[in-house]
Image (cartoon, rainbow, N blue to C red):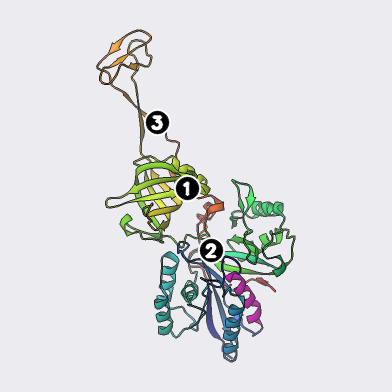
Amino acid sequence: MTKRTIHIGLDDTDSTRKGCTTYVAAVLVEKLLKFGIDFTDYPNLIRLNPNVPWKTRGNGALCLRIQHDRASEDKIKETVMSTVEEQSDLQYRGTDPGIVFLGTPRIPREIQVFAKNTITGITNLRDAVKLLGKFNGEACAFKNGRGIIGALAAVGETLQGDHTYEIIAYRTSENYGSKRKVDEASIFEMDKATRPYTFNNVDTEKKRIIITPRGPDPILFGIRGETPDTVKTAFRMVKVLEPVERWVIFRTNQGTDAHLRRVKELNQISSYSPVIAKGTVSKGPRMIRGRHVIFTVRDRNSEVDCAAYEPTGALRGAAKKLIVGDRLEVYGGVRAPSQNNPLTINLEKIRVPKLAQQVVYRNPVCPTCGKRLKSMGLNKGYRCDKCGARYKELTKAEIRVKRELRKGLYITSTRSQRHLTKPYGRYGMEKRHQNVKGLIKEWHFP
């Protein structure tokens, strides 16, 4: 019997107090396999625009891509809907789960474009429902159903370009809310052994692990890397000191900069958009409360503030060394203007292609004895304390200062990187038009 293809999208099941949509997907992997289905891809974990104000934590949506017998289709859909209902924090205001079912072997181009727009900007429920109707998709909404937007975006992002993998291990329910129990030394050893084929395991500046979340969600830890085999090998190197309920390997857009959209001019940026923009420093860096650094860039038509916050580490350090005239490419999410603050790009990266020449002016040296002269007052000339000579015609000397800052790319510290931010180690490792050709054995448990 010929099997049918169905893409199942999920989003907005969790809240700040409990739950995780990746966990819902992991539970569904186990349940759906009982219907004799085949997975055509690893579960897709698609991080959406990290700047939208209504996200919970990582703004991740999920897609399960399967083939199944026609006779089991209704049971599959019933299982998905009941599992989402059971696992979602429906009592929490702002948790509005959505499920999408799309039964086409190939994802229509319009849905792919919708996904890209949801990752790089803001889309709406009306357009999502319209697309589902056009392509005979189905949706299940809980409460206001805003999760349908992310669910459709997860279906539409097929990860044909750059992508990475993450293996996520989940806790048993009795340990929810307690400190994660893992051997930290083993994680540093794992990172050293697998780098650069895994990334963002540890914060090298603060010497601490960052693969374990700190909230009440069911995730024990997650390891991100370039291939399924790599993350699985790294997973086995971690010494876990509490029970693991299940684990799954996801294919994902994490660490790819998929959210950033280049704009030609600064006047094209809008609130909540992740952007790449070019400009010249027009107002130098200044410190604000909390040791954050603000500077301003402009192009021929517009001007915008850029913020490097204290946790961004080396990025903030680079921002402090900028001067007026430096040419930059800035990367980050646009914060909406408020009563006290203008439109601002919250920086994830800056690239410095050209540095301005830094000049200081100093009193001239005495032509007679070589000692630095002292000013006698405004427009009154200079005198030499050593030999007593006086000079009315001399002017201050222009001295070029060697810049501390170098041209190049500066990225926020590992501890403050967003899920989508591409770290240094991934530059040069991007994947191009790579399809999944079969899944590795034992890509999930149970």
Give the quadrant of the C terminus: bottom right
Name the spot of residue 215 as percent of width and height, x first. 62, 61
Residue 265 showing in the rendered view: no
Give the spatial CA distance, label 1 vs label 2. 23 Å
Q: Which mark is residue 410?
A: 1
Q: Secondary structure at mark 2?
A: loop
Nearer-N-terminus badge (1/2):
2
Give the spatial CA distance, label 3 vs label 2. 43 Å
Name the spot of residue 126 as percent of width and height, x first. 40, 78
Disc nearest the viewer among 1 and 2: 2
Q: What is the three-letter code of the residue carrying label 3? A: Val
Q: Secondary structure at mark 1?
A: strand
Q: Secondary structure at mark 3?
A: strand
Assess whether residue 196 is covered by the magenta stretch. no
Label 3 crowding class (10 Å Cα cut-off): few <14, some 14-19, many 20+? few
- The answer to which of 369 and 363 lies nearer the viewer is 363
Disc nearest the viewer among 3 and 2: 2
Name the spot of residue 18 as percent of width and height, x first. 61, 68
Which quadrant would residue 132 be assigned to in this image? bottom left
What residue is disc 2 on? 58
Name the spot of residue 34 as percent of width and height, x first. 66, 83
What residue is disc 3 on? 401
> Residue at the location (57% across, 61% down)?
226
Give the spatial CA distance, label 1 vs label 3. 22 Å
Which quadrant would residue 70 be assigned to in this image? bottom right
Nearer-N-terminus badge (1/3):
3
Where does the magenta region start and end? Answer: 20-33
Q: Which mark is residue 224?
A: none
What secondary structure characterizes most of the magenta part?
helix
